[in-house]
Image (cartoon, grey):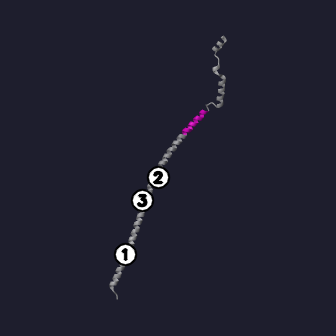
Amino acid sequence: MYNPNKFKLALHLCNMAEEEYENQYFTEISSKIRDLEDKQRIIKDRVLLIGQNLIEMKEEFHSAFLAMKKEIELLKRDTERLKSFFETASSEFSKFAKKDEVEILSKQAKMFQPLEFVTRKDLEKLKNN
């Protein structure tokens, strides 16, 4: 009844099934680990790329900021020059003649008519004639 070979065979089959299960389990775990390592590598590459892009963007923004700062300084200098020019021009305007003053002088010049004046010699010639 008791056959030791059957027991050994059953034990051997059990051991083989257990080994196959363990191999399958380790293969699955190994596959998952590889997948996780690949994902980690991809994420690492992306993070490095994002870091490089951030550095490039920072440099571009810094350059643009410096250019704007220089432009603002130039605009400030130009504004100061314009302000100085307008102050000088406005102080000079008070020295100019006003329109009504020019009209008065024009009327006086028309009344005066220096070209129509007679010289003494001309009077003497008229008197002698």
Type of amino acid at the residue the image marks with label 2: Met
Rendered view: 111 above or below 57: above
Q: Which residue is identified by label 3?
A: 45
Residue designated by label 2: 57
Magenta segment: does it hold 89? yes
Callout 1 secondary element? helix
* Label 3, residues with CA under 10 Å away: few <14, some 14-19, many ≥20: few
Dominant SS of magenta comes to helix
Q: Position of residue 121 (x, y in %)?
A: 63, 14
Residue 20: image quadrant is: bottom left
Of the image marks 1 and 2, the number of the one nearer the N terminus: 1
* Residue range (magenta): 80-93
C-alpha separation, residue under disc 1 versus residue under disc 2: 55 Å
User: Which quadrant holds the C terminus?
Assistant: top right
Point 45% across, 54% down: residue: 53
Mark 1: give few (<14), some (14-19) or many (20+) Cα within 10 Å: few
In the rendered structure, which amino acid carries the disc numbered 3?
A: Asp
> Earlier along the polypeptide chain: callout 2 or callout 3?
3
How many numbered badges does the structure rendering display?
A: 3
**Who comes first in sequence, dot 3 or dot 1?**
1
Of 103 and 75, the residue lying toward us: 103
Q: Residue furthest left?
A: 5
Q: Secondary structure at mark 2?
A: helix
Give the image location of residue 111, x and y in percent.
67, 23
> Mark 1 sits on what residue?
20
